[in-house]
Amino acid sequence: MTEIFGENLIADQNAKLADRLAQDYEHLAGQLQHRGIDVEEITHKARAFAIAVPSWGTGTGGTRFARFPGPAEPRNVFEKLEDCAVINKLVRCTPSVSPHFPWDKVDDLDELKEHTDNLGLAFDAVNSNTFQDQPGQAHSYKFGSLSNTSQAVREQAIEHNIECIEWGKILGSNALTVWVGDGSNFPGQQHFVHSLERYLDSARKIYDAIPDDWQMFIEHKMFEPAFYSTVMQDWGTNVLCAMELGPKAKSLVDLGHHAPNVNIEMIVARLIQFRKLAGFHFNDSKYGDDDLDSGSINTYQQFLVFNELVDAEYRNAPDFDPAYMLDQSHNVTDPIESLMNSAAEVQRSFVKALLVDREALDEYQDANDALMAANTLKIAYNTDVSPILAMARMRSGGAIDPIATFRAADYRQQLASARPAAGGSSSGIV
Ligand code: LRH
Ligand code: MN
């Protein structure tokens, strides 16, 4: 489907904006030069930035109340990947896709790998799913999976994770993300210690199946689907378990999995310090795990997270190689537009963090000059780096304005006949 975006369409759209971009870029170059920053060095780093797209984010998402699918929704993993290729063709910073099993499971994984290679994409971390019961499944996950009181259920969940590793190997992935919704809805319903002991025992069996060149990403979440306690509830439980399991296990931070106002950037700093930062599921939220578009609500927090990540690079933090992924649910926007916008907004936070004068910041921090330290971050944050992001896209063969170019292509209309709607609204994640 990327042929809908023939070279000409992107070039034609860029031609309308190139002069204005050159002016804006030159102006920003001058501003940064005054601050001793080489704009070309920053643009080079912006072009190297990459974030994975969630396969499950390419279809319209929903809530327990309803899902309102849009036109020409992807109907299978092959079409999801075609949409991911469109995203990368326009924003040039999403070269990989994170699959979710069994949602993306097909009989011929070699064919899926070939399809993905042909689209110029790669697979990122694979995600297991022991939070839903599949048709014909022997044991239910109603009362949990890896921490379930039933050994048979735990073994079924362990087996599924090990299968995901085998499938991931065929797809060329090198990490398994394990998120479980295990928990309780009533005080007294679950023994906090026994349930975590069962979780750890199960996780060890999965860990032992992790290849030496792979990693196991443990994802914590405060609540939902359990609403009183969650076995893997917070970063503390997460990092303790990752340390307990071994060097291949690290802690993944989904930004929406924390209570409002939690200092997520400090959690990131802690995980980096103890060499246990797996990476991220970027999204935004105002209340719960809202899975809203990254950078749509709390842009300063996202910038502060990247300030910790860039600082880690700056001080050569050991074992620092975080995986960046989006994990969002697009209920009222075109998923392709939201994923393009979100990838660019995460890239924006990264680029702004590159502009922080770290030597000055170190001095102000050592001198306890709180105001100037805070302002040193704000100077970077308040810099409009849009020309750098657009120049990075253009130089990498993408669109100066991805949304305008996507709309100019009339992608959904052109695909409507090829992708007849499945019909009707339904609930839940695609
Ligand atoms: C859980 C979660 C997890 C995925 C799911 C789609 O809320 O963030 O990362 O498996 O969303
Ligand atoms: Mn997530």
Image: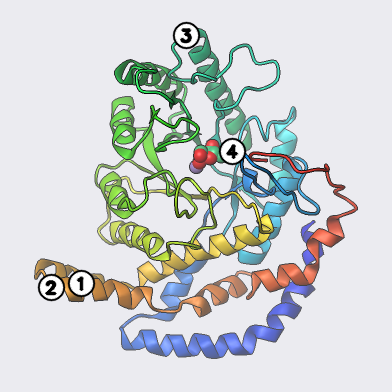
User: Gap in Å between the C-alphas at discs 4 and 1?
Assistant: 43 Å
Question: Where residue 170 appears, x then y in whole percent?
Answer: 63, 32
In the shown orientation, is residue 407 left or right of residue 24? Answer: right
- Distance from label 2 to label 1 (Cα)? 6 Å
The numbered mark, 4 or 1, whose residue comes first in the sequence reads: 4
What is the three-letter code of the residue carrying label 2? Asp
Residue 102 pos. (x, y %): 65, 29
* Point 36% across, 67% down: residue: 353
Q: State the residue position of label 4.
A: 172
**Mark 4 or mark 2, which has the lower sequence index?**
4
Q: Could you tell me residue 54's position as x and y percent?
A: 59, 46
Where is residue 221 drawn, in percent x and y? Answer: 42, 38
Q: CA distance from mark 4 to mark 2?
A: 49 Å
Give the structural element (helix, strand or loop) at label 3: helix
If you read the primary sequence from the N terminus, does the residue marked by circle 1 or circle 3 appear first? 3
Q: Which mark is residue 369?
A: 2
Position of 76 relative to 402 (above/below): above
Helix, strand or loop at disc 4? loop
Please report whichever mark, 4 or 3, sits nearer to the chain's N-terminal start.
3
Q: Which residue is mark 3?
A: 151
Q: Earlier in the sequence, mark 3 or mark 2?
A: 3
- Assign the N terminus to one quadrant of the image: bottom right
The answer to which of 373 and 46 lies nearer the viewer is 373
CB contact under 8 Å: marks 4 and 3 = no
The residue at which mark 1 appears reads as: 373
Q: Residue at x 69, y 48 (%)?
A: 59
Q: Amino acid at mark 4?
A: Gly
